[in-house]
Amino acid sequence: MILVTGGAGFIGANFVLDWLAQADEPVVNLDKLTYAGNPENLAGLRDDPRHVFVQGDINDRPLVAKLLARHRPRAIVHFAAESHVDRSINGPGEFIQTNINGTFSLLEEARAFWQGLAGADKAAFRFLHVSTDEVYGSLGPNDPPFAETTAYAPNSPYSASKAASDHLVRAYRHTYGLPTLTTNCSNNYGACQFPEKLIPLVLLNALNGKPLPIYGNGLNVRDWLYVGDHCAAIRAVLAGGRLGETYNIGGWNEKTNLDVVHTLCAILDELKPAANGQPYASLITYVKDRPGHDARYAIDARKIERELGWKPAETFDSGIRKTVAWYLANLGWVENVVSGEYQNWMATNYQNRGAS
Ligand code: NAD
Ligand code: DAU
């Protein structure tokens, strides 16, 4: 049995589905079901006895203690977080509450549980913390990619909250000996991503004939990794990662935002041409930049390849085609997600934003 937090969100749900597709080890899935959590992501597991879903907050320590005592997991894989940079700029409070205080609560309960174990169970226990490359800050065009030894320099409330949680995890290893592992991954894309993030937002807006908002000049660079590859990397780290170590995970796929959006438009032109005959790229609209927008992220993923034999299976071309195909085949999922709350966020972030 493993305990997954945030397993109804984008990466967590992909992880739980992949995990149960590969092995029969059951999963307890603790998720608060914030706006980003969606039980529909896990619809394939309805009535599957290997999946125990619990709606709850990682800050609810009695609940976490009860789940650990009842299910006695051999590992905790911690995805639960507030994850969207723009929301953290608009309102950082929830990011502090979940990403920092929530991780602290989980670490405290994990420590108490682990200290109560003995022998082989104690030796086998793992706390795997899922984090981001954004903790390293922003690169210039000619800087080497982020390595595990790169100094932390988070720039947004989101990345600062994730950096704080990484430091807490490190401290619990160093001080108490808790058997921790940390992963720092680049931008994920794939099925079930909430359409506030660049790729699904552009897909949805294009299909609805709406402007495709590009922050600033569109030349910011991100490294893109297909979500299935991220899930495989986490499984590899859980299985063989060295205790207390961090592993950078990336796709070796640096792209400007404009490149990404043009690729999406070209695939849509091919698979679902616009009714008005116009290329989707004609909807590209430059809008006011994100405050403090990091210029470039890039990941040196050689350590995880060298130590654990993991490298991405998908290229950007193959992964992005799968992703567009998934959204086109799941417009019902999209319709259910685009609820009132989503409309509120779109108004908050994009109305009155103005041109760049
Ligand atoms: P997401 O926003 O899609 O999902 C987050 C999930 O956590 C949701 O299901 C939500 O309901 C749940 N949650 C939020 N607060 C909670 C709380 N207090 N208690 C319990 N559950 C709570 O996020 P995601 O994109 O799937 O990211 C998952 C993790 O991976 C995060 O820790 C994020 O920092 C990290 N990460 C994301 C990316 C990316 O590109 N999306 C890249 C690297 C790392
Ligand atoms: O690098 C890993 C991180 O990637 C994760 O830790 C975060 O959880 C995840 O949200 C993601 O952060 P980004 O800020 O890079 O992702 P986002 O999809 O929001 O933006 C990607 C790029 O696209 C970024 O440079 C901002 C730009 N962008 C984004 C949106 C939503 C636009 O130009 N227009 C938009 O409307």
Image (cartoon, grey):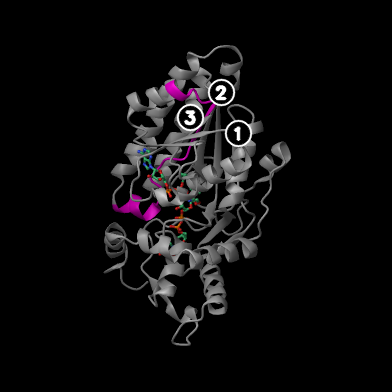
Judged by depth in the image, the label closer to the viewer, 3 or 2, is 2
Mark 1 element type? helix
In the rendered image, which residue does mark 2 sit on?
125
User: Upstream in the sequence, badge 2 or badge 1?
Assistant: 2
Judged by depth in the image, the label closer to the viewer, 3 or 1, is 1
Considering depth in this image, is 23 or 178 the residue closer to the camera?
Answer: 23
Q: Residue at x 41, y 63 (%)?
A: 332
In the rendered image, which residue does mark 1 sit on?
238
- How far is disc 2 from disc 1 in space, using C-alphas? 10 Å
Considering depth in this image, is 88 or 198 the residue closer to the camera?
Answer: 198
Q: Is residue 187 magenta?
A: no
Q: Residue at x 62, y 44 (%)?
A: 232
Mark 3 element type? helix
Location of residue 5 (image quadrant): top left
State left or right for residue 307 relative to residue 231: right
- The answer to whether the residue bearing label 3 lies less than 8 angstroms from the nearest atom of ligand 1 is no
User: Upstream in the sequence, badge 3 or badge 2?
Assistant: 2
Determine if residue 147 is in view: no
Whole-percent x and y of residue 315? 66, 60
Give the position of the C terminus as an image quadrant: bottom left
Q: Residue at x 31, y 46 (%)?
A: 92
Q: Classify mark 2: residues with Cα within 10 Å, few (<14), some (14-19) or many (20+).
A: many
Q: Classify mark 3: residues with Cα within 10 Å, few (<14), some (14-19) or many (20+).
A: many
Magenta segment boundaries in residue numbering: 70-90
State left or right for residue 297 relative to residue 194: right
